[in-house]
Image (tube, rainbow, N blue to C red):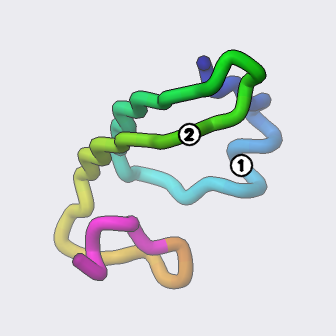
Amino acid sequence: MKWVEERRENLLAASHAREQVAEVEAAAAADGRVLGLRVRLTSEAGAFHIHPLTQAVEPL
């Protein structure tokens, strides 16, 4: 799967200046149902969070 969004969608919904990489593995049934996910999220959180659009790793 590949995530695709237009620039306008990104400007309306995303925060700026944070590099984030998500590696996702999915297990699916033959009929397309998702049975499981394994996600590895690597985020450059920096020194300060962006409230309220904070990084997912900060609460950990």
Query: What residue is shown at x 58% (from left), y 27% (from top)?
Result: 28
Q: Which residues are magenta?
A: 54-60
Residue under pointer 1: 11
Foreground: 41 or 17?
A: 41
Please determine whether, in this image, residue 46 is positioned above or below residue 38: below
- Closer to the N terminus: mark 1 or mark 2? 1
Q: Residues within 10 Å of mark 1 (few under 14, many from 20)?
A: few
The local secondary structure at tag 2 comes to strand
Residue 32: image x %, image y %? Answer: 73, 24
Q: Residues within 10 Å of mark 2 (few under 14, many from 20)?
A: few
Residue 30: image x %, image y %? Answer: 68, 17
Left or right for 50, reference 43: right
Query: What residue is shown at x 35% (from left), y 32% (from top)?
Result: 23
Mark number, residue 35: 2
Q: Is residue 17 magenta?
A: no
Foreground: 26 or 40?
A: 26
